[in-house]
Amino acid sequence: MEKKYPVSQLFFSQACGIDGLSLLYQGTGAILIPPKSKYYYMPHIVIKDMDTLERALQNYLLVVAQTNILFTKLDDRHDSAYFLGILIKNLTNEDYLCLEEYVHKFTQFILDDTFCEYDSRKCIGNLNAEYQVEARRFSEFYGAETPFAMKFFKRNKHIQYELPLVRYGIYEKNGEKVVRIYMVQTKRIYKDTEEVKTIKLSLNAVNSGVKNYRDVPPSMVVSLSLFLGMVHQAGIRHIEVADYIPRRYMHFKGVKTEDERNRIQFHATDKYLRLFLRLDTQLEGFEIESYPNEVDCFMHIHLQEVLRSNNPELQSYIELGKNTSKLVGAKSKRKELIPQ
């Protein structure tokens, strides 16, 4: 008797209908093949086992329906079919190799409550008796790389300055939590008023003594340092840095050759990865274990038990992140949605 895969079939219908992918069954799995005319050099999407995919998709939709965050808000325009269709928007090269594993990880991204105490903005400390630093976890929009982003704000009595946000997802691997960082990105552009210039000058202090990677914006160094401090405080030691999301570039850039693909991939990832290379020169206890394409498509980073910097200003930001307090009773019970 032929097995039925109702949710998987709906997923295939959405993926093939929206992006023009072709479905080819292979043994217990399947392959989704992109049209060359639209997504030149985009990898095939591999499903290793249909039973596993069906279970992963069912659990994903259960979480979407029962988790009340912006990313999973069901309404007249965003139904189950829609949330199945957006799953393939943010695959890394590694995720293309086993879709069911990615669906499981992404479901964990949604459920993770590691920093839920920052769903309302909170002050995490003071700097030099002049500035306050605040943190807030924001729910991302539909189809973003991750369900959540962390934002930081540096303020004094004159101005509130929004630092670059950190888009991240947290999942478990071999019983330990892993933070996957997708982006550190500036969202708001400020006019160069005297107050803004003063804030920017205060951020430049993290450049003191730096010889390499000085082109990396200090604001990004500050945001990532604050976030790393929070990650370290939460007891998480493993970080994956996503280097490239093919679908976001292949279609819109009109790529037609492999050389074009390689050029776009280099420019899309080089500046971002330089941020982590910069911190590798400034932080003790920040260990880059492998670079993209050495083990897989991610940069793998291990945080050791001691994380610190010889730069006094950068050390201040690290400490602000590390010293964030946990709120009693703040953790949600959304993990109960995952069937055991």
Image (cartoon, grey):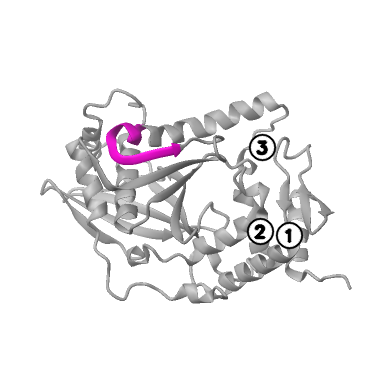
Mark 3 belongs to which amino acid?
Answer: Met
Q: Is residue 67 left or right of residue 308?
A: right
Mark 2 belongs to which amino acid?
Answer: Glu
- The residue beneath circle 2 is 100
Identity of the residue drawn at 83% across and 70% down: 3
Badge 2 vs badge 1, beta-carbon distance below 8 Å: yes
Which numbered mark, 1 or 3, is in the foreground of this view?
Answer: 1
Q: Position of residue 221 (x, y in %)?
A: 32, 39
Q: Secondary structure at mark 3?
A: helix
Q: Position of residue 334 (x, y in %)?
A: 47, 73
Q: Is residue 256 magenta?
A: no
Q: Which residues are magenta?
A: 278-289
In the orientation shown, which residue stands out farthest toward the right?
Answer: 1
Q: Secondary structure at mark 2?
A: helix
Q: Quadrant of residue 233?
A: bottom left
Q: Quadrant of residue 315?
A: top left
- The residue beneath circle 3 is 250
Q: Nearer the viewer, residue 66 or 322?
A: 322
Q: Is residue 132 above or below residue 327?
A: above
Which numbered mark, 2 or 1, is in the foreground of this view?
Answer: 1
Identity of the residue drawn at 24% across and 33% down: 204
Q: Is residue 121 left or right of residue 20?
A: left
Q: Answer few, some or many: residues within 10 Å of disc 2's Cα (few below 14, many 20 plus, some between 14 and 19).
A: many
Quarter placement of the C terminus: bottom right
Q: Nearer the viewer, residue 20 or 93?
A: 93
Q: Secondary structure at mark 1?
A: loop
Which numbered mark, 2 or 3, is in the foreground of this view?
Answer: 2
- Label 2 – label 1 distance at C-alpha: 8 Å
- The residue beneath circle 1 is 49
Identity of the residue drawn at 64% across and 43% down: 247
- Total marks placed: 3
